[in-house]
Image (tube, rainbow, N blue to C red):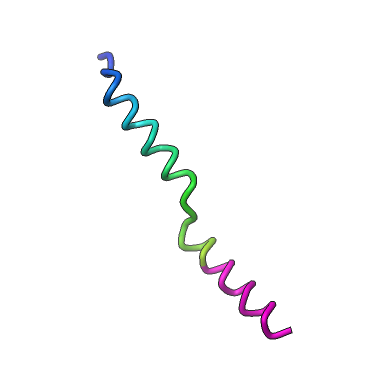
Amino acid sequence: MIMSLESWAVFVAASIMLSITPGPDLVFILSRALAMASRS
């Protein structure tokens, strides 16, 4: 089955958005790092 150009473009855009956005673990690590940096 061959995907149409429009559905292929939506798939690629969604894949890029999912790979760019940070997960909850990265957000937690960054918030902890910023909290520790502001205390020192």
Residue at 42%, 45% (x, y): give it: 18
Side of 8 where 40 appears, left or right: right
The picture quadrant where one finds residue 7 is top left
Q: Which residues are the magenta region?
A: 28-40
- Magenta-drawn stretch contains 35: yes
Using the image, determine if residue 31 lies above or below residue 16. below
Q: Who's the residue at 56% across and 72% down the image?
A: 31
Left or right, 37 with reference to 30: right
Predominant SS along the magenta part: helix
Quarter of the image for residue 5 reads: top left
Is residue 4 a member of the stretch shown in magenta? no
The vertical placement of 3 against 15, above or below, is above
Residue at coordinates 38% horizontally, 35% vertically from top-left?
13
**Quadrant, the N terminus:** top left
- Residue 33, image x and y in percent? 64, 72
Above or below residue 15? Residue 34 is: below
Q: Residue furthest bottom?
A: 39
Q: Nearer the viewer, residue 32 or 1?
A: 32
Closer to us: 23 or 21? 21
Task: For the C terminus, give its image quadrant.
Answer: bottom right
> 13 left or right of 35?
left
Q: Tell me where residue 36 appears, x and y as whole percent.
A: 66, 79
